[in-house]
Structure formats: structure tokens, C-alpha cells
Amino acid sequence: MATQLRALSGLEAAGRNDRDAALRALGSLAAPLTAEADPTHVTASAVVVGEAGVVLHHHKRWARWLQPGGHIDDGEQPAEAARRETAEETGLQASHPVGGPVLVDVDVHALPRPCRRWARASGPRGAASPSCVHVDVRYLLWAAGEPAPAHGESPRVAWFPWDAALAVADEGLARSLRRAVALDRRV
């Protein structure tokens, strides 16, 4: 994964900062893909594109529109976790570009809540849990059809035209969307 991160080019200043933070995290974490191993861990998500634009889901906990993604399962690679999370959260069977997985961006962000998965598995008893820090690697996926998330997953999933997606996106997602538009034309 470090090789993919180093290969990210044409990044905005915030993207370069996140890429460098991600590389530092990968170099210092014993098990970067395991949420239970450290409050800072890698997650995987997808910018899912198609004829209708880009798919976003309304996150049930954070109450905002986001790209599909989440934690990486044991033995799973980030690119496959992005596909699995997309299927779970949107009901779409998305695919990587023909040439294989394409890393669009990385976004490093702290969550505004304690890191319960780590605390349950590894944290000291009785200690306050620190916030989770997600090193979110974002892959380009292609899909078609209408989203149909499984019961209990995302309450709303929709195709957004690019301009509308940018209008509801936070800064990190907007950066990833801009990069995906450029990459989708080249891949």
C-alpha cells in the first residue's frame, strides 16, 4: 500500500499532507489494517462512478452524504474491502477498472467519538478511549444500476450528478471526487 500511496501524484496541498501522514502511520503501526490494534488504522472506501455520476450514501451515524467505505476485515486487502463495503452499503456490485485497482486519494481524519473497537480489544481497562483516526484509502470503482442497500445499512443511497455531489461533500470527499473525475477519463 505504501507504494500506491507514494505513486499518488498531482495532489492538492491537503492531499499531500494526508498522503505523508498516511505513510508515517503505515511506518509506525504494527497492524495498520486492523481496527482493534490501534486507534489509528487504515479504512477503505470507494468513489463509485457510472453513467449517472457518482454514488453517495447518507451515513446513518454521521448524518451526511459520504462515499461507501469502512473497516477492513481480517485477511482482506484494502481494494477488496472498498468493493465489499460498496456492495454492503449501496447494494451495487461495483468493479475496479480493467487494469486493476486504482487508488484515487487518501484522507486522514479523526472521528468525533472514542475508538470503541480498539478499546474493547486492546485498550487499558477503565482508561478513556482516544478518538479513532482513520487513514482512509479511496479507490475508483465503476457501477451501473439502481442502488438497493441491505436492510440495516444506509438509509439513503443515490446517484448524484458530479456538481450535486460536490455541493454536499465535505472537503476531503470533494478532493477525492475531483481526483476521480480526472482519473476516470484516463483509466
Image: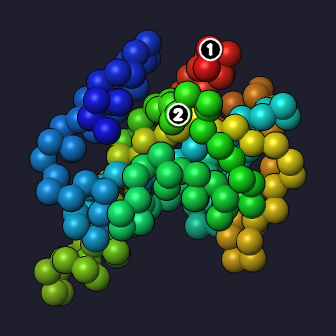
The residue at 40%/15% (across/down) is 9
Say left or right for 85 vs 147. left
Q: Is residue 59 above or below residue 24?
A: below
Give the answer, above or below, for where 126 lies relative to 81. Answer: below
Q: Nearer the viewer, mark 1 or mark 2?
A: 2
The disc labelled 2 sits on which kind of residue? Gly
Which amino acid does the dot numbered 1 rest on? Arg
Place of residue 19 in the rendered image (x, y in percent of width and height, measured from the top left): 32, 30
Q: Within 10 Å of the Cα at label 1, are there few (<14), some (14-19), or many (20+) other Cα atoms?
A: few
Q: Residue at x 65, y 43 (%)?
A: 95
Report the side of 30 relative to 88 (left or right). left
Which one is earlier in the sequence, the residue at label 1 or at label 2?
Answer: 2
> Residue 61: horizontal and vertical position, in percent?
59, 67
Q: Is residue 172 above or below residue 64?
A: above
- Residue holding disc 2: 100
Q: Residue furthest bottom?
A: 126
Residue 110 location in percent, x, y?
A: 36, 52
SS label for mark 1: helix
Q: Quadrant of residue 6?
A: top left
Considering the image in quadrants, where does the C terminus appear?
Answer: top right
Q: Residue at x 35, y 46 (%)?
A: 135
Please give the residue where the numbered disc 1 appears in the rendered image. Answer: 186
Residue 171 visible at all: no
Residue 186 position by quadrant: top right
Q: How many marks?
A: 2
**Could you say where residue 154 lies in the image, as x and y percent from the top left?**
70, 65
- Which of the image's four quarters has the N terminus? top left
**Picture residue at 35% right of the left edge, 21% below the top:** 7
